[in-house]
Image: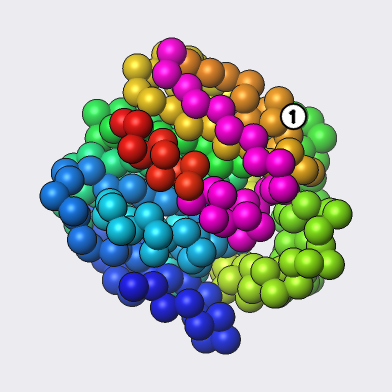
Amino acid sequence: MANHDSNIFTTLAQEEVTLDNGVRLAYYDSKESHGLDTALVLLHGYCGSSAYWEKVVDELAASIRIIAPDARGHGDSSSPDEETYTMELFAEDLAGLFNAIGVRRAVLLGHSLGGYITLAFAERHSEKLAAFGLIHSTSLPDGEAAKANRDKAIEAIESEGVRAFVDGLIPKLFAQDRLDDMGPELARCKEIGYATSKHGAIATARGMKSRPHRGSVIEASKLPVLLVSGAQDGLIPASSTFAATGADTRKVELEQAGHMSMQECSAQLAEELASFIRSI
């Protein structure tokens, strides 16, 4: 069971492994396989951690093994000194984790940044996947305005630090008409974000800025693909999440969600994820 004491823990990770590339990854592992050779791997978003998934992991873990890593530079994982954390670097970290802990096949679902990593992984290691999906993410690259915003984020983190940046970021991730009702969730996500290393936040922003268009990964895939959007997502609208579809793509739009359905409407998201897993 995940420990959900928000006063102490900013990650669900209770295990860690040092990969062949020297990166130390912390991760949550529900461990029970339920007789399946497939695990559900959940990737968090930018300035988050495995704790982003804390409201859904216990319900999903009743039927499938759950792995939720802290990405490099986030949560309890280490922050390697590369100047740019490309999506390809994150993907190879994940491949190394699979090898280290014996994950042969996975349903890989990524939130926001985690979705960018998911696409890079699916492009390179599709043989390790039973299915994949994007949660409030997109296959599109950053446009010019988004790239400029990445530069502004880097400048803000360099000058003011992670804490001030996270304080400004988190409220933008939630449905704006429900902010007054989301006080505990806002505070929780800020606490999770504060654990992001300064170098990790900057290097990850550079990597997101430089990521390529990966619509073809979805369009050409023969695997089941899940695309989840929030109807009130102010960062990645449904049109961007659904920009590319394939032969076996399921599209879900959550009416009450902004960019953080795993915190805003976790029961609804958990049911959509469970339904997708059952369908595979």
Residue situated furthest bottom in the rendering: 7
Residue 248 location, x and y as percent?
Answer: 42, 18
Q: Amino acid at mark 1?
A: Gly
Seen in the picture, residue 167 relative to 146 is either above or below; the reply is below
Residue 98 in view: yes
What residue is shown at x 74% (from left), y 66% (from top)?
182
Q: Is residue 39 magenta?
A: no
Q: Could you tell whether 277 is left or right of 212 in the image?
A: left
What residue is shown at x 22% (from left), y 63% (from top)?
31
Work out which quarter of the rendered image holds the C terminus and state it.
Answer: top left
Residue 85 location, x and y as percent?
Answer: 51, 49
Q: Could you tell whether 7 is left or right of 148 in the image?
A: left
Residue 201 location, x and y as percent?
Answer: 61, 59
The magenta segment = 247-270
Classify residue 267 by image quadrant: bottom right
Residue on which the image places disc 1: 143
Residue 128 location, x and y as percent?
Answer: 25, 35
